[in-house]
Image (cartoon, helix red, strand yellow):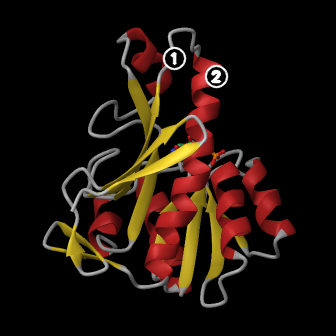
Amino acid sequence: MNIVVLISGYGSNLQAIIDVLSFHTSMKIAAVISDNPEAYGLKRASQANIKTEIIPGKNFCKQDFELQLTQALEKYRPDLIVLAGFMQIIPPSITKAYATKMINIHPSLLPKYPGLKTHERVLDNKERQHGCTVHFVDEHIDHGPIIAKAVLEVYDDDDCLALSKRVQTLEHYLYPKVITWFVDQRIELEKGVIFLDGKPLSPEGKTFFFAQEDIIDAELF
Ligand code: GRF
């Protein structure tokens, strides 16, 4: 299985994917593509001997970006495209072409809080729960059929930094886990319904609750 990972920055999710999936012989990260030449994630990729490509997004005309990204993806023939902190909007021609093969991780419990500054908004609204979501990518931002969520409790004395760190820990757990479902061919998307091990998932996706150190696996079939 060929995976292409798209990044823009630090690449901690990329690292979690590299670390966990290095044990998986049937999957290979064919390339890491970044729109940002300075992304630290590019160094992580090189250290793991993974090919890298830069497709500039900033100050670049939309059509050129679309063409370059289309060509790069065609070149690697990905079975799965993993958005890991990629800060460019994916053109609809590409989301359509890879509707069953492109996934994203977002630091909120979607459909709540798409977009930026999710932790601030969660704290402002005094939410009791927060977390991250992995979803298929459609033409809307942070939107598409939901595969899985990891949920944590928001504490009274939480601040943005503490909360963002805990959410990232969850991301590093959830994203590699979902990717192994693809590698092991356990997951399918058919007419907007996600099947895991042949059973339909609820529209909420498979949800994992994190209470202190424990993970409680909520059955949502
Ligand atoms: C993560 O919080 C992810 O949810 C969001 O962008 C961030 C990327 O972080 N989409 P990193 O580059 O993987 O460290």
Horizontal arrangement in the rendering, residue 9 relative to residue 1 (left or right): right
Where is 33 relative to 40, above or below? Answer: below
Residue lying furthest right in this view? 47
Pointer 1: residues within 10 angstroms few (<14), some, or many (20+)?
Answer: some
Horizontal arrangement in the rendering, residue 94 relative to residue 87 (left or right): left
Label 1 vs label 2, nearer the camera: 1
Number of numbered discs overlaid on the protein picture: 2
Q: Earlier in the sequence, mark 1 or mark 2?
A: 1
Q: Position of residue 125 (x, y in %)?
A: 35, 12
Disc 1 and disc 2 in contact, CB within 8 angstroms: yes
Closer to the camera in the image, 108 or 199? 199
- Residue drawn at the location 45% of the way across and 83% of the way down: 79
Closer to the camera in the image, 58 or 29? 29
Q: Is residue 143 visible?
A: yes
From mark 1 to mark 2, how far is it between C-alphas? 10 Å
Q: Quadrant of the C terminus?
A: bottom left
Q: Is residue 57 visible?
A: no
Where is 165 relative to 57, above or below? Answer: above
Q: Position of residue 209 (x, y in %)?
A: 43, 43
Q: Position of residue 114 (x, y in %)?
A: 34, 35
- Residue drawn at the location 76% of the way across and 65% of the way down: 45
Task: Kindly identify which numbered label has been placed on residue 162.
Answer: 2
Closer to the camera in the image, 106 or 163? 163
Q: Secondary structure at mark 1?
A: loop
Where is 97 relative to 202, above or below? Answer: below
Q: Secondary structure at mark 2?
A: helix
Mark 1, residue position: 155
Identify the amino acid type marked 1.
Tyr
Identify the amino acid type marked 2.
Ala
